[in-house]
Amino acid sequence: QVQVVESGGGLVQAGGSLKLSCVASGRIFSISTMGWYRQAPGKQRELVATFTSGGTTNYGDSVKGRCTISRDNAKNTVYLQMNSLKPEDTAVYYCNARGQLWDSKQYDYWGQGTQVTISS
């Protein structure tokens, strides 16, 4: 019903920057929240940043001041600009999209994830 596809991951040196993109497509009537989460080996998935349809952003404590989330509503796309990257930012980054389908049902979908590796 809904496809969520991430792109932009890769290998970056510590102190560098990376921009992730996520596109949601399918039988989408509206998107209430799109955002990014990450999961490092042996750790629980944690919030990176989210962007609501009302324009509210929310950041995880570990990335505040280093990451910026933005959204293109017309393209159902959300971006994550990450700066001053640290080795501890290494993780699989997942995009999440929540909202309403054309048949009024609510949805909550995840992408397959994109690997971000920061070398020291």
Image (cartoon, helix red, strand yellow):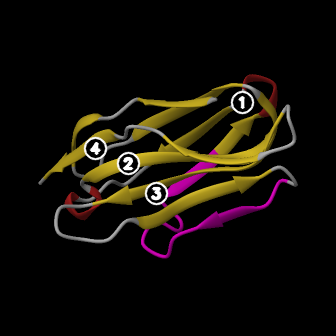
The quadrant the C terminus occupies is: bottom left
Q: Is residue 104 above or below residue 40?
A: above
Instruction: Give whichever of discs 3 and 4 has the lower sequence position.
Output: 3
Tell me the residue that label 2 is attached to. 93
Amino acid of disc 2 = Tyr
Q: Residue furthest left?
A: 120
Residue at 17% from the left image edge and 62% from the top image edge: 41
Q: Main secondary structure of the magenta part?
A: loop
Dot 3 falls on a residue whose secondary structure is strand
Q: Is residue 46 above or below residue 25?
A: below
Residue 90, percent across and down? Answer: 24, 54
Amino acid of disc 4 = Val
Chain part drawn in magenta: 55-69
Q: Is residue 33 left or right of residue 36?
A: right
Q: Nearer the viewer, residue 12 or 103?
A: 103
Residue 76: mark in rendering? 1
Tell me the residue that label 4 is attached to. 116
Tell me the residue that label 3 is attached to. 37
Q: Tell whether label 1 touches label 4 (CB within 8 Å).
A: no
Nearer the viewer's eye, disc 4 or disc 1?
1
Dot 1 falls on a residue whose secondary structure is loop
